[in-house]
Image (spheres, rainbow, N blue to C red):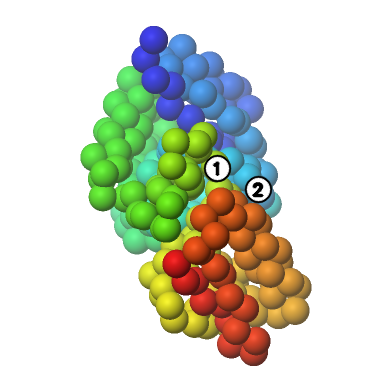
Amino acid sequence: MPEKTYILLAEDEAALGQIVKESLETRDFIVDLVDDGERALRLFQEKNYEALVLDVMMPKKDGFTLVKEIRQEDDSIPIIFLTAKSQTNDVVEGFSIGGNDYLKKPFSMEELIVRIHNLVQRKQLQKSSDIITVGGYLFNFPKQTLQFEDDELVLLTHREAHLLFHLIKNKNQVLDRSLILNKLWNSDDFFAARSMDVFISKLRKKLAKDESIQIINVRGYGYKLTY
């Protein structure tokens, strides 16, 4: 059987959203459908999608605002905008904030499917260079997975993956606490800092099978990864 592609579809027109979802599901996609930007962001942060298909005009959080926030957490996931807007400046804005493609309503389902496949396949071509060795673990940043030797894959959340990626980039150096809080949490206040401490604890547990790996708390400055 063909491998299925897991995507998030955010569309506030109920009838259109259901039609697109059902059409994609007949073509080897698994689709989560939401009708507002806030729910889309929550699902994005909770799950591991291979592509996002987002309406621009949505309640609670529009597509452009949503993508600006998503790109702070994940700069590589393929994103396609769906919109009734046709002005050139809207198209330019969509690409400038991190969209990879743009379809104007009404659109052909076949065209949408081809565009999703092209973007996903383009990203998969980078797969071999995306795997980072961390002690005895293999860390796949785009797929947000960890694997210790021949064990099963461990899934990371978006923030866990990005936090680990930045720790690795600064291996044996202190990762500035305020810098990473502002980058991943958009704030360095008390509540964001406590949230980051929780994520660090989760990462320690997920890396615990290799005793050489340590995430050291450098009090007053940040964290340092050693292995």
**Looking at the image, which residue is at 40% across and 48% down?**
138
Left or right: 101 in relation to 8 = left
| Residue 103 position in % (x across, y down) | 36, 37
**Looking at the image, which residue is at 26% across and 44% down?**
128
| Residue 87 position in % (x across, y down) | 36, 51
Q: Which mark is residue 124?
A: none
- Relative to 221, is 68 above or below? above
**Looking at the image, which residue is at 32% across and 50% down?**
130
- Image depth: mark 2 or mark 1 in front: 1
- Relative to 60, is 110 above or below? above
Q: Which mark is residue 42?
A: 2
Q: How far separated are the C-alphas under marks 2 and 1?
A: 17 Å
- Relative to 165, is 24 above or below? above
Q: Nearer the viewer, residue 175 or 227?
A: 227
Position of the C terminus by quadrant: bottom left
| Residue 71 position in % (x across, y down) | 46, 59
Question: Which class describes the residues within 10 Å of circle 2: few (<14), some (14-19), or many (20+)?
Answer: few
Helix, strand, or loop for circle 1?
A: strand
Which residue type does callout 1 highlight? Answer: Leu
| Residue 178 position in % (x across, y down) | 58, 82
Left or right: 195 in relation to 120 = right
Q: Which mark is residue 155?
A: 1
Question: Which class describes the residues within 10 Å of circle 1: few (<14), some (14-19), or many (20+)?
Answer: some
Q: Which badge, 2 or 1, is on the more N-terminal residue?
A: 2
Helix, strand, or loop for circle 2?
A: helix
**Looking at the image, which residue is at 37% across and 15% down?**
2
Please tell me in which quadrant of the rendered image residue 93 appears. Answer: bottom left
**Observer able to see residue 61:** no
Which residue type does callout 2 highlight? Answer: Arg
